[in-house]
Image (cartoon, rainbow, N blue to C red):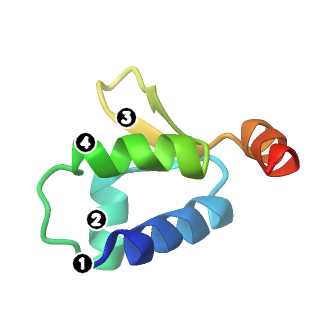
């Protein structure tokens, strides 16, 4: 999978699920072979689509798109 396909898929799925999803949920939805997300791609998602990862009490990270931050980035472009 190319990064651009990964980015677009993750973005669309997170926009449909504003409460966020875990990596395991995203991995399952897209049948990704990766046990963990690539740190480089994750960093790019943070800057390009406003990805944030929030730690839950169960020690898992919830992936979300920070809509407010994303809107601010869009207006700057």
Question: Is the C-beta separation of discs 3 and 1 under 8 Å?
Answer: no
Q: Of label 2 and label 3, which has the lower sequence position?
A: 2
Question: Is the C-beta separation of discs 4 and 2 under 8 Å?
Answer: no
Question: Is the C-beta separation of discs 4 and 1 under 8 Å?
Answer: no
* Above/below status of 7 relative to 41: below
Disc 2 target residue: 27
Q: Residue at x 27, y 55 (%)?
A: 24
For this rendering, which residue is in front, 46 or 19?
Answer: 46
Q: Of label 3 and label 4, which has the lower sequence position?
A: 4
Disc 1 target residue: 31
Q: Residues within 10 Å of mark 3 (few under 14, many from 20)?
A: some
- Look at the numbered disc 1 and give the secondary structure of its residue: loop
- Look at the numbered disc 3 and give the secondary structure of its residue: strand
For this rendering, which residue is in front, 35 or 51?
Answer: 51
Question: Is the C-beta separation of discs 2 and 1 under 8 Å?
Answer: yes
Q: Is residue 16 left or right of residue 3?
A: right
Q: Residue at x 74, y 36 (%)?
A: 69
Q: Position of residue 22 (x, y in %)?
A: 38, 48
Question: Is the C-beta separation of discs 2 and 3 under 8 Å?
Answer: no
- Look at the numbered disc 4 and give the secondary structure of its residue: helix
**Mark 4 and mark 1: span between their CA atoms?**
19 Å
Residue 61 is labelled as 3
């Amino acid at each position: 999978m190319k990064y651009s396909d990964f980015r677009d898929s993750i973005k669309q799925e997170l926009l449909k699920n504003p409460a966020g999803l875990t990596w395991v949920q995203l991995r399952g939805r897209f049948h990704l072979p990766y046990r963990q997300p690539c740190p480089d791609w994750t960093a790019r998602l943070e800057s390009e689509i406003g990805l944030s990862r929030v730690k839950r009490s169960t020690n898992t990270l919830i992936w979300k798109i920070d809509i407010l931050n994303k809107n601010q980035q869009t207006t700057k472009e």
